[in-house]
Amino acid sequence: MPGPSGRPGPWPWWAWAPAGRTATAAPVIPGAPRERTLDVSLDASRTRGPETETPGSRTEPRPGRLTAHEARQRLEHARSTRLAQLKALEETGQSVHDHLMSAQTEAIRRVLKEIDEASGRIDDGSYGTCLACSKPVPAERLEILPYTRYCVACQRRATV
């Protein structure tokens, strides 16, 4: 029996999608308000405040840029995941592994605090800037770890 894609089998449409394909951006509606973007590829002086924005500077996001909405979505997803983990740990009740559960609970709470701090950095305009060296944090790193405070080099130095 053909599926919605016209191919045989009960497979969902995405099972037949070519490897490496990505979604395209939605079309821009003329006159619609444009979303604020966070530049993660500029130095800290250009990401700190609205004084560097001009009326024409709010254009479509370029590669290496995240919109504030995208950054908030990533942070909210990370937050809800950690809250679900915390709830699951708390629902397990007493266990022989109380010490391990306590360590996991503390680690999750630490990440939740980092997520809240990252939300604050979005608000003050410093999101995407390394707190140690003030250089931009690569967009790829922010996609993987949206609440990170440091670029890869500074994170390595901090953990060594």
Image: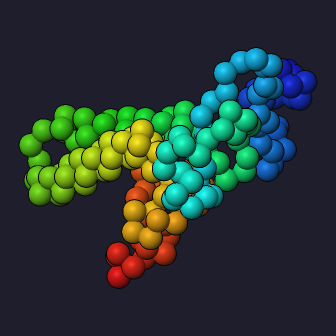
Q: Farthest residue in the bottom direction?
A: 160
Residue lying at 19% horizontally and 52% vertically, measured from the top left: 106
Q: Residue at x 25, y 40 (%)?
A: 86
How many numbered tags mark residues here?
0
Q: How is the model colour-coded?
A: rainbow
Residue 33: image location, x then y, percent: 67, 21
Can the viewer see residue 142?
A: no
Identify which residue, 13 or 84, lies in the foreground. Answer: 84
Q: Quarter of the image for the C terminus: give it.
A: bottom left
Of 119 and 101, which appears nearest the observer?
119
- Spot occupied by residue 6 in the image (x, y as percentages of width and height): 90, 24
Above or below, 15 against 156 in this view is above
Q: Nearer the viewer, residue 47 or 72?
A: 47
Position in image of residue 100 (x %, y %)? 17, 57
Q: Residue furthest right?
A: 6
Inspect this view and state whether residue 63 appears. Answer: yes
Residue positioned 48% across, 75% down in the render: 153
Look at the picture and state if 59 lies above or below 46: above
Question: Which one is nearer the viewer's eye here, 138 or 11?
Answer: 138
Question: Is 142 left or right of 113, judged from the image as shown?
Answer: right
Q: Quadrant of residue 25?
A: top right
Tell me the quadrant of the picture where the N terminus can be found. top right
| Quarter of the figure with residue 42 | bottom right
